[in-house]
Amino acid sequence: MATDAIRMDGKVAIVTGGAGGIGAATARLMTARGCQVVIADIAYDRAQALAGELAGALAIHLDLEDEASIIAMIDQTVAHYGRLDVLHNNAALLGPDIAQNDGDIEHMDTALWDRTYAVNVRGTMVACRAALPHLRAVRGNIVNTVSNLALQGHMIQAAYSSSKAAIIQMTRAIAASHGIHGVRCNAVAPGMTVTPALLEAFPPKLRHAVEAETLRDQLGEPQDIAEAAAFLASDAARNITGQVLVADGGCASHVPGLSLFRDFFAGEGQ
C-alpha cells in the first residue's frame, strides 16, 4: 500500500450535516486531503458559506425526513462530479429542544421517538440505498456517525441512543452484503464532543461529569472525530469494514466510577 493512502485525491465525498460541528471539521479535513466534498445540510445558508471556503466543494440542501431530498442529494452529486466515492452519514436529529425531551422510555413522547427514527435511521438507510450503486462502481465506502451511547445504557437520550444502535447494525449489514462488490461500510462512535450544539444542550455540570470519566485530559473536539472519519473513508483503512471505531476519549473502556477511584487514590476521597 502506498504511504500516502490517507490522501483522498480525486475522490468525491458527501458529508451530511456538513455545515457545522463534526461535519464541518470533516469536510475541511477531507478537502485538505484532496477530496471534493459535498456539504449537505438542512441549514443551506451555512452549507453554502462553508462550501465557498473549500476548493471544489458543493453545497446541497438536505432534509433527512424527505426521501426525495435524500435521493436528490445523491443524484446532484453524481451529476456534478460524475462519481461518488464516500458517503459520510453524519447528520442526526439534535438540538437543545430535542435533547431536553429525549429522556427515558417511561416518559418518551411517541412523536419524538418516531421523528428521531425517521431522521437518524430511515434517513441514513435511504441515503445508503441511493448511494450504493454509485459506490459499487468505484469501490467506494460509507462512514456512519453513531455514538458511544449506542454501546452503553444511560438514563437519558433513549431515542437517540437506540437509533444510533440501529445504525450500527445497518453498518454491519451493508458491510456483509456489499463487501464482495468492493464497498466498505464502517461507523465512528464519538463520545461527548465539544460542538456548539453540545454547549447549548448540556449544562457545564453534566459536561464536567463526562469529562471526569474521560481518559484524556479533555473532551473530544470536532477535529478528533473528523480524523477518525476521514481515516475510515481513506484507502488506508481498506482492510477495515463492518467495524465501529469508538472515539470517545476512553470513556467506554473502563469500569464505572473511575473518576471516584482516581480521586480516592489521589487522597481526595480519604
Image (cartoon, grey):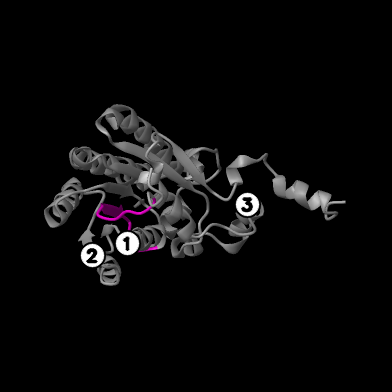
* Tag of residue 31: 1
Answer above or below: position of 240 versus 180: below
**Label 3: element kind:** loop
Q: Position of residue 196 (x, y in %)?
A: 45, 65
Tell me which residue sits at (57%, 58%) in the image: 219
The type of residue carrying mark 3 is Thr
User: In the rendered image, is residue 112 in sight?
Assistant: no
Q: Position of residue 96 (x, y in %)?
A: 44, 59
Report which residue position mark 2 lands on. 56
* Cα gap from disc 1 to disc 2, whole angstroms: 8 Å
Tell me which residue sits at (30%, 31%) in the image: 179
Q: In the rendered structure, are the residues bearing label 1 and label 2 in contact, judged by CB atoms less than 8 Å apart?
A: yes
Q: Which circle's residue, 1 or 2, is located before the other in the chain?
A: 1
- The label nearer to you, 3 versus 1, is 1
Q: Which circle's residue, 3 or 1, is located before the other in the chain?
A: 1
The image quadrant that residue 127 belongs to is: top left
Q: Magenta segment, which residues?
A: 6-20
Crowd around label 2: few <14 · some 14–19 · many ≥20 (10 Å): some
Tell me which residue sits at (62%, 56%) in the image: 211
Quarter of the picture holding the N terminus: top left
Extreme-right residue of the structure:
270
Crowd around label 1: few <14 · some 14–19 · many ≥20 (10 Å): many
The type of residue carrying mark 2 is Gly
Tell me which residue sits at (65%, 41%) in the image: 254
Extreme-left residue of the structure:
79
Closest to the observer, 89 or 29: 29
Q: Is residue 19 magenta?
A: yes
* Cα gap from disc 3 to disc 1, whole angstroms: 30 Å
* Cα gap from disc 2 to disc 3, whole angstroms: 37 Å
Report which residue position mark 3 lands on. 214
